[in-house]
Image (spheres, grey):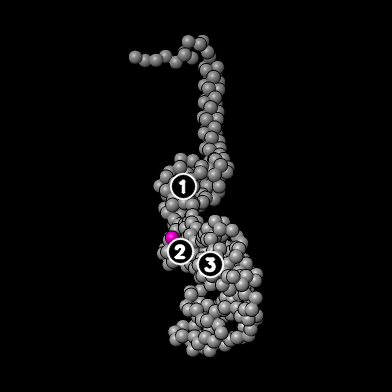
Amino acid sequence: MKFKNPLDNLNLTPSERQLLDRALSLLWRFTAVTLVTGLLAMSIMKKHQLMIVPKVIGMDQGQAESALSSKGLVMKADKQVYDERIPAGLVSSQIPRANAYVKRGQIVEVVISKGNPKVKVPSVEGQSLPEAQISLAGLHLRVGRQSLIHSTEPSNTVLAQVPAPDDLVDSATEVDLLLSDGISTMSYLMPDLLHKPLEQAFKTLRPAGITIQKITSEVHDDLDSGTVLSQTPAPGTHIQVKDSVSFVVSAKSADASSKPRYSKVVFDMPLGNPKRLQIDIFDGTGTRTIYNKMESPKDHVELGVNVTGKAFAEIYLNQEFLQEIPIE
């Protein structure tokens, strides 16, 4: 089937037909140039179009590259660093940052995390809590749970730790501490010592660490010397270690032993390591510490002391009772 040119239906002279053909040729040329120009302009605009950088932090390399490629961006991953927050193998930072506007084809530099660095746990046992906090913070570790237990160490002294010293852990790991709460304050009931010999009262109170602060004498010829007539605190009162008590005791009018006298206390240190020597005196005036120093083995200690009535010295080594020495 042969299609007819619509122009054939027009009654045109040859010259008019030639002029119309030229006009249509120019129109087609103009249309083609316009189309090519438009396509070229669209290509240039697309090339220079601004893109929003997606957030790729926390993605693995494959995911990050795919996310950037979908926006016409190119990923560059040349660096790896330790990062406490981002697991190993994931993007920890990016330049340009997320939501920035860049041209298509822009390179986005990403840093890959090597994970949390390992840290050797320091020993903080024996340190105070503030000292331990500083030691741990210097290695990017933190103090974790804190537990208290009574001990002879000063309060807030570190007694134990978890993880143990020299363990390898992640940075920012918490180290749990066991802290000293000091010596337990035990409570006792004041015993009834009325009508008992003063020496018996002292030996009853001594194991609890109770100090006889003051002893006052009253003349009672019908009673043995040193008989307890009254006591403070009263029987049944709650008392604690290091508390002190007072007594009123009997004395005979002709009792010469109630007068002050000068005497000596002599002690030789035993063999072994140096130890703290403590000497307490008990006499008719009460109890008191007259010596408390570190001494070396075989040291000879000789002290002069004024005592009243029946008296003796108690010897302690490193706070443990050793022996009792009568004072003449």
Q: Quadrant of residue 291?
A: bottom right
Residue 211 placement (x, y as % from top left): 58, 68
Given residues 245 and 29, the one toward you in this image is 245
Q: Quadrant of residue 237?
A: bottom right
Residue 159 covered by magenta stretch: yes
Q: Which of the two discs, 2 and 1, sits closer to the camera? A: 2
Given residues 38 and 186, the one toward you in this image is 186
Q: Earlier in the sequence, mark 2 or mark 1?
A: 1
In three-dimensional space, the C-alpha distance between marks 2 and 3, rounded to whole angstroms, equals: 47 Å
Helix, strand or loop at mark 3: loop
Q: Tell me which secondary structure the magenta stretch mostly adopts.
A: strand
First to last magenta residue range:
158-162
Q: Amino acid at mark 2?
A: Ala
Q: Which mark is residue 160?
A: 2
Q: Amino acid at mark 1?
A: Gly
In three-dimensional space, the C-alpha distance between marks 2 and 1, rounded to whole angstroms, equals: 38 Å
Tell me if 257 is positioned left or right of 208 in this view. right
Residue beneath label 1, please? 58
Q: Quadrant of residue 271?
A: bottom left
Q: Earlier in the sequence, mark 3 or mark 1?
A: 1
Q: Residue at x 60, y 86 (%)?
A: 263
Residue 195 placement (x, y as % from top left): 55, 65
Q: Amino acid at mark 3?
A: Lys
Examine the rendering and report whether any part of residue 307 can be seen.
no
Residue 113 placement (x, y as % from top left): 46, 55
Q: Residue at x 56, y 58 (%)?
A: 235
Tell me if 59 is positioned left or right of 30 in this view. left
Q: Earlier in the sequence, mark 2 or mark 3?
A: 2
Q: Would you place residue 34 above or below residue 172 in this image?
A: above
Residue beneath label 3, please? 196
Q: Which of the two discs, 2 and 3, sits closer to the camera? A: 3
